[in-house]
Image (spheres, coloured by chain):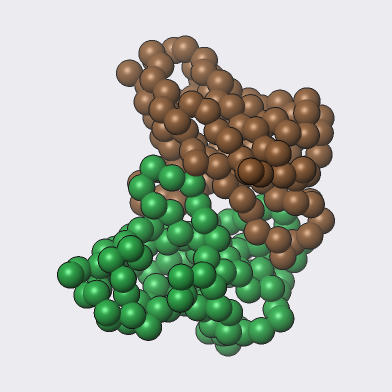
């Protein structure tokens, strides 16, 4: 079975600072990995996805994530945080033979001015 | 515009009443999903459907029911058997059930409060 662990339920950074949101996955088969963002009282929007084509994946709004099989990680980064990045971020995994998307508990990103 | 429409956005019900949440998509997607979101717990899968007239239980199906009579529609009923129904409910869909690298598209959610 697949599972996802997001380290840190809350992360706080200053505007202009590096954003690093951590995601570790567990999967017995090659995984498909996703990062979503959610603004208050809204649905989820896809930031980026890993589908085995390249280990470094670039997404929208300047975010990127690197798939590291040896570390079973898929951490999300952004070089310079903007106030508009304040939201909740979810990492999700789907296994090779599964149709279900399994989500992590989420990380709330706060950006300080 | 194509997308997923959930209605209503906010819903209040008395304890013991059944309530149905609507989810409609015009993306021509085969697969549809219902998730429940509680603070600090991420999204948990309630039910999913990969094709019309077929659906499967997710991880927390007790106290919920669904139907999939049309490709576009996947309503969720929260029954009186659901012990703690107050939550944010999200509907999602995917283009095809057999393409694992495709992402799910989400509606804007329905916040259900039971008083």
Quadrant of the rendered image containing residue B115:
top left
Image location (x, y in percent) of residue A88: 38, 58
Q: Residue furthest left?
A: A113
Q: Residue at x 37, y 26 (%)?
A: B113
Horizontal relation, residue A57 to residue A51: left or right: left
Horizontal relation, residue B22 to residue A19: left or right: right
Residue nearest the observer in this picture, B39 or A80: A80
Q: Which chain is brown?
A: B
Horizontal relation, residue A107 to residue B100: left or right: left
Q: Which chain is green?
A: A
Location of residue A106 with respect to A19 vertically, above or below: above
Q: Is residue B48 visible?
A: no
Q: Residue furthest bottom?
A: A70
Residue nearest the observer in this picture, B66 or B107: B107
Q: Residue at x 64, y 43 (%)?
A: B1
Image location (x, y in percent) of residue A16: 27, 79
Q: Residue furthest front?
A: B1
């Amino acid at each position: 079975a697949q599972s996802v662990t997001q380290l840190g339920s809350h992360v706080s950074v200053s505007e202009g600072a590096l954003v690093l949101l951590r995601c570790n996955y567990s999967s017995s088969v090659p995984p498909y990995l996703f990062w979503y963002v959610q603004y208050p009282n809204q649905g989820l929007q896809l930031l980026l996805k890993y589908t085995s084509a390249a280990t470094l994946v670039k997404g929208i709004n300047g975010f990127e994530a690197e798939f590291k099989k040896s570390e079973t990680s898929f951490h999300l980064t952004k070089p310079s945080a903007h106030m508009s990045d304040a939201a909740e971020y979810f990492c999700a995994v789907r296994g090779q033979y599964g149709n279900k998307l399994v989500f992590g508990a989420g990380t709330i990103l706060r950006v300080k001015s | 515009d194509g997308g997923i429409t959930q209605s209503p956005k906010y819903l209040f019900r008395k304890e013991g009443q059944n309530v149905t949440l609507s989810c409609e998509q015009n993306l021509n997607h085969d697969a549809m999903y219902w998730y429940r979101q509680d603070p600090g717990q991420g999204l948990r899968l309630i039910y999913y459907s990969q094709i019309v007239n077929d659906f499967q239980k997710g991880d927390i199906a007790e106290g919920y029911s669904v139907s999939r009579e049309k490709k576009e529609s996947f309503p969720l009923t929260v029954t009186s058997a659901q012990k703690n129904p107050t939550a944010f409910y999200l509907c999602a869909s995917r283009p095809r059930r057999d393409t694992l690298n495709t992402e799910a598209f989400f509606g804007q959610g329905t916040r259900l409060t039971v008083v």
